[in-house]
Image: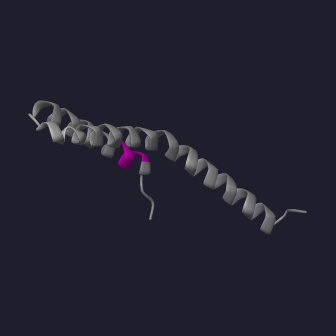
Amino acid sequence: METNDVLVSAAGAVAFAIAFVVLLLVPLDADQHWWRWVCVVGCLMGVFGCWYIPRLHRGRAAAAERHAAKEHPES
């Protein structure tokens, strides 16, 4: 099953960014401010995923090519 992993990662980053903005607008108790950090970290992980996933796919494709070349060497 083919999926657009970068799109999924970007959607997660946007969702966390929206949640962060909402939590900035909502008054929180002093012991509940950690929820904002959850949103910050979630957004950063989504951005990292957008950067890393294409590199991961290229690396996997290159490894598959190398593996196929070893199994079926052309004379």
Q: Residue furthest front?
A: 31
How far from the left and from the top, in percent, is residue 62?
Answer: 68, 52
User: Seen in the image, is 3 located left or right of residue 60?
Assistant: left
Classified by dominant secondary structure, the portion drawn in magenta counts as helix
Q: Start and end of the magenta stretch?
A: 6-10
Taking the image as shown, residue 51 lies to the left or right of residue 28, namely: right
Q: Which residue of the protein is positioned furthest toward the right in this rendering?
A: 75
Residue occupying the far bottom of the picture = 71
What residue is rendered at 36% in x and 42% in y? 10
Q: Does the magenta stretch include residue 8?
A: yes
Quarter in which the N terminus is drawn: bottom left
The image quadrant that residue 71 belongs to is: bottom right
Q: Position of residue 30 (x, y in %)?
A: 14, 36
- Whether residue 55 is in magenta: the answer is no
Please identify the quadrant where the C terminus is shown.
Answer: bottom right
* Residue at x 8%, y 34% (from the top left corner): 27
Give the image location of residue 32, x and y in percent: 17, 41
Quarter where residue 26 is shown? top left
At 36% from the left and 49% from the top, the residue drawn is: 8
Total label count?
Answer: 0
Q: Position of residue 72 (x, y in %)?
A: 80, 67
* Residue under the point 57% across and 44% down: 55
